[in-house]
Amino acid sequence: MRRLRPGLIAILVLNACGGSSPTAPTPLPSDLAAAPTRVVLAGKSLSLDASLWRDFMPVSPPDGKPLVAGLQVRTEDGSDVPATVRADMVWVLNGADTWSTLPREERSRQETAPVYELVARDGPKWGPGITVDVVVRLHEAGGRKSLLRVANRLIQGTF
């Protein structure tokens, strides 16, 4: 399996979408792997959950569709994630391999409240049946950025 390089993937995704690269430098793999599982931004303690899957239904290609990650940022107290908190990058770590991309808010916060919900699509064809770590980079108004990680998430398959 070839290794996916975070910077290259982000550039390709951004070029395809007509976007510009995120302003913060790409963290080192060791920084991603050591990212905390709770952070405080905008006065709220935040955690991350992730659902990962690949589609192998009969309409899919013989080797399945690419990885999709559904991300949920939650407050510890169950209140809404502050609107000033945004995600600008996601990384999925599979051993020495890393996939990075820009997450999208496909449903409004009013629909997903109190959770801040994001989706990352068109990932690598890893799994199913393996576990990975997921890291998001969150930032709040004013520029403070934090990495937030959830470990050992199973990539599932739909058959």
Image (cartoon, rainbow, N blue to C red):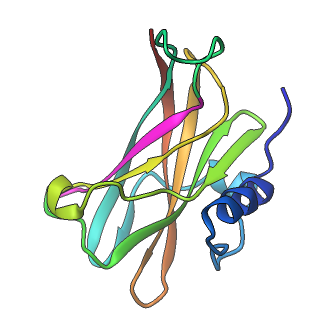
Relative depth, front residue between 105 and 41: 105
Q: Is residue 135 above or below residue 21?
A: above
Is residue 1 rendered magenta in the image? no
Q: Nearer the viewer, residue 83 or 9?
A: 9
- 55 to 151, vertically: above or below: above
Picture coordinates of residue 68, whole percent (x, y)? 50, 36
Front-most of residues 30 and 102 = 102
Place residue 89 in its image quadrant. bottom right
User: Residue at image x 37%, y 59%?
Assistant: 105
Residue 75 lies in the magenta-colored region: yes
Quadrant in which the N terminus is drawn: top right
Determine the residue located farthest toward the bottom in the rendered image: 142
Identified at 71% across, 66% down, the residue is 26
Image coordinates for residue 128, horizontal then vertical, percent: 56, 17
Q: Is residue 6 visible?
A: yes
- Most prominent secondary structure in the magenta stretch? strand
Q: Position of residue 116 (x, y in %)?
A: 29, 58
Q: Residue at x 66, y 27 (%)?
A: 125
Q: Which x, y percent locates residue 10?
A: 70, 59
| In this rendering, position of residue 43 left or right of residue 138 | left
Q: Answer left or right for 117 relative to 66.
A: left
Which corner quadrant holds the C terminus? top left
Span colored in magenta: 66-77
Residue at the image position 36 percent from the left and 69 percent from the top: 40
Q: Quadrant of residue 79?
A: bottom left
Examine the rendering and report whether any part of residue 27 can be seen: no
